[in-house]
Every structure is written in C-alpha cells, then in structure tokens.
Image (spheres, rainbow, N blue to C red):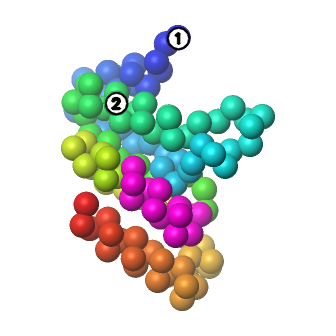
Amino acid sequence: GVNFYDKVSQSLAKYHATFNFTCLEMWTWNQPYHAYSDPEHLVQQVLECTRRHKIRFSGENAIEKYTTVGFHQVAKVMKHATDVADGMSWLRLSDKMLTPHHKKLMARFVQRMSHL
C-alpha cells in the first residue's frame, strides 16, 4: 500500500517544516480490537519517515491521560526520537490536571523529559 506519512514527510521536507504528530501517549494493546488501531506503529512509521526525509518531529497527546503510564509512554517515544525531536506539547489542560496529584506527575514528567 501507499505510505501516506512518507508522502506528507516528503512534502514537509520541501519547506524544511516539522512533522507534528499526535497519539504519543497511546498504546496499541489497550485499543479496542474492532477499531483496528495501532497507534504505536503509526508513531514509529512517522518517525521513520521523518528520518528518511531529514525533517524534524514534534508530538502531542491525543487524549486526556494524566497517568504515570501515559507520561511514561510519551517519554519512551521521545527518547527514541532524540535525533529528530523538535518538541512536545501536552494538550487538554483541565481541572483534573491541576489537582496536586496530577501536578506532581506532570512535574516528574517534565523533569524526565529535560534529561533526554
């Protein structure tokens, strides 16, 4: 089949643009079977395309997931992307994110990201 992300990367390379991709906090194992969803593979596919076309990569979360494992998944992706990484945005700031527990988790995540 056609690798759409490769075509997008090729187009972005013409303008020295960054490929911003979502779903960095998601895992394949917890997606509903009927959805045929493989977010981890999609992220890896995009990373391979950015490397092939020598463009930068930035990422973001797709859903509100303020958990240790969600933060860990993003850090894992970004650790494997340090050669092309340009940034990471955490979306969906909500009241839940501002609770003391979740602020602590975010602080640990930011500290971990700063050491990549």
**Considering only vertical position in the picture, is 92 above or below 11?**
below
Residue range in magenta is 65-77
Q: Which residue is rendered at x = 46% and y = 18% of the image?
A: 3
Q: How many marks?
A: 2
Name the residue beneath numbered marker 1.
1
Give the number of the disc on residue 11: none
Q: In this view, does 87 lie to the left or right of 61?
A: left
Left or right: 107, with 82 as reference point: right
For the point 55% across and 40% down, which residue is it? 39
Q: How crowded is mark 2: few (under 14 residues within 10 Å), some or many (20 or more)?
A: some
Between 11 and 62, the one lying in front of the other is 62
Disc 1 packing (10 Å; few <14; some 14–19; many ≥20): few
Look at the numbered disc 2 and give the secondary structure of its residue: helix
Near-viewer residue (90 or 106): 106
Q: Residue at x 32, y 74 (%)?
A: 111
Vertical position of residue 74 compared to residue 103: above or below: above
Q: Are marks 1 and 2 in contact (CB under 8 Å)?
A: no
Is the residue 36 above or below the residue 10 in the image?
below
Tell me which secondary structure the magenta stretch mostly adopts.
helix
Place of residue 23 in the rendered image (x, y in percent of width and height, measured from the top left): 53, 47
Q: What residue type is labelled 1?
A: Gly
The image position of residue 53, as x and y in percent, is 26, 25
Secondary structure under the numbered disc 1 in the rendered image: loop
**Percent x, y of residue 84:** 25, 42
Give the residue type that dot 2 points to: Glu
Quarter of the picture holding the C terminus: bottom left
Q: Is residue 34 magenta?
A: no
Report the residue marked by disc 2.
Answer: 48
Task: State yes or no: residue 76 in magenta.
Answer: yes
